[in-house]
Amino acid sequence: MNSREIVLAHLEGRPIDRLPLMPITMMFACDHIQARYREYCTNYRVLAEGQIRTAETFGFDYVNTMSDPAREAADCGATVQYFDQQPAALVEDQALLVDKTKLVALKIPDPLGGGRMHNAIKAVALLKERVGKEKIVEGWVEGPIAEAADLRGINAVMTDFFDDPLFVRDLFAFVIEMELRFAREQVDAGADVIGVGDAAASLVGPRLYDEFVWPYEKKLVDGIQGLGAKVRLHICGNTRFSLRSMGKLGCEIVDLDSWAPIAEARQQMDANQVLLGNLNPVAVLRNGTPSTVTGSIAECHRQAGPRFIVGAGCEVPRDTPVDNLRALCAYAYSHRP
Amino acid sequence: MPGVAIVDLSQHTAMLDLKRLHDAVVTGDANTSRTLTQEALTAGTDPLQLVNQCLVPAMDEVGRRFESNEYFVPELLISARAMKAALELIRPLLTARGDKPLGRVAIGTVRGDLHDIGKNLVASLLEGGGFEVIDLGVNVSPETFIATVKEKEATIIAMSALLTTTMPAMRTTIEALKQAGVRDKVKVLIGGAPITQKYAEEIGADGYSENAVGAVALAKKAATAAR
């Protein structure tokens, strides 16, 4: 089996002879080809080159198009600040929806309209063309609260839950419609998996997550699966109190940040749920040694059980020692599920 | 009258109002917080009493609930907003009569980093804990931190970074404080997702906390040490 076949077989519950390996790399992949991160974010050829060479060097089973959280918001017209050597970021005090009433007039941008979403779609197509038979091609969209925070400002959206819950629902509905259009084009371009990044969901606690965020995440997950792709959910931060609900979304992969105890995820989610992660990317992967990395990922595997994919809790930090990353990869190649 | 307790009704009412103000902050009701504060001040309640017996305990309770996962970021932010509504009325009175805060904290997310939610949580809890907070915002240069120490006499610098790529700006800022000759005038506290105690020690920070509640305890310790 090649990489792609291993991942697909594992997700479908068929036997495989080693663990799949799907760590998130962005700045690490950019540094690997000695490119400027600004180019990685804005030029799909640079992103594809970084992903392919990193995946080939370390034996990853997939390539991914994630570079920063600002693609969709940029196409909506939000103010985005670009940096030479780190991810593009939204300028919060100039957020597009500082004035909430502007939501009514906000148009969903055309994902093929030549903007940053289009750039990501071109990356998917190029990755599919170059390595799509060998490796999983993973596209990316923002989840409802992450994108709402990008458009409205994260501090404002946090208080909107209490001040104007109807607005929050309207904003989430707008986001889901936009993300599903973006996902559709990525699937059409060849994405096997769509990653859903909903970083801010870890900030709101279980009550607001269940009441506001989960229903829209569910619509997004169902919609992507309806397009024929599989879904990888990644929520940065501590999702410990929402694990049970996350497990009910029906995602093919739940990719856990290191703050969330993987043993609790296993306990609270269906026994068949594939979990990915989740050693601490900074304290263990970047600052540890090959030996501590091996020990830590082995413990993740033990707690997660056989329905497991090897990865870090979040992005592999750019200055991670190569030997540490190789230790993570070696674990996948030397262990059965 | 033998056997009948004499109750000072005005004092009882005042206590009830303080309790209501406390609860308004804990539940994040900014309008009630502002109204009750104004009423209490109009009735002659000592502003420092409002801070010490009401706002500080209320934010302590908010911090406790946050730490024990009863509250999350949205709840903490609306409580902080309610506290600020009260403080906006109280602070000018305290300043006018020369009352000093526990310390003056210059807080900001370091240069190159635009993430501010963690920094905002810490700033709110520090304010609720009795500190004067100068919020420098995001993408704060070492020069701005230095100027705040020199011109506004900040006694504590609190720096936040969310990215491993922006962490080095903390070291740069501490070096710049040394070069500007003001390192000894301030305690430097750091925090953020990728930060560790080990990193704080490596770069010569005075303290590190992994969460917002711990940051307040750390700042109180630093303020005590600075006296």
Image: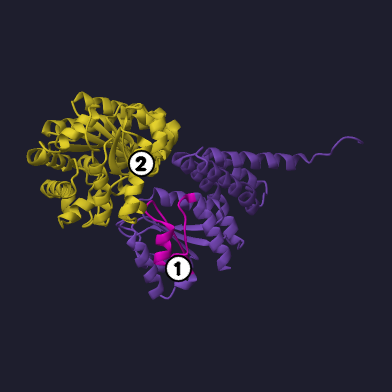
Which residue occupies the foreground of this view, A51 or B132?
A51
In the drawing, what numbered circle is on residue B54?
none
Q: Is residue A320 left or right of residue B185?
A: left
**Where B212 falls versus B226 (above or below)?**
above
Which residue is denoted by mark 2 in the rendering? A300
Q: Quadrant of the N terminus of chain A?
A: top left
Neighbour class for label 2 at 10 Å: few (<14), some, many (≥20)?
many
Determine which quarter of the picture holds residue A158.
top left
Which residue is denoted by mark 1 in the rendering? B149
Given the image, what chain letter belongs to the residue carrying mark 2?
A
Whole-number angstrom distance, CA of label 1 to CA of label 2:
45 Å
| Residue B100 visible in rendering | yes
Foreground label between 1 and 2: 2
Which residue occupies the foreground of this view, A309 or A161?
A309
Q: Tell me the amino acid under the disc marked 2.
A: Cys
| Residue A97 visible in rendering | no
Q: Is residue A151 left or right of residue B157?
A: left
Among the chains pictured, the one given purple colouring is B
Q: Identify the residue at horizontal 11%, vertical 41% (top origin).
A: A127
Q: Identify the residue at horizontal 21%, vertical 57% (top origin).
A: A84
Q: Quadrant of the C terminus of chain A?
A: top left
Q: How is the image coloured?
A: by chain
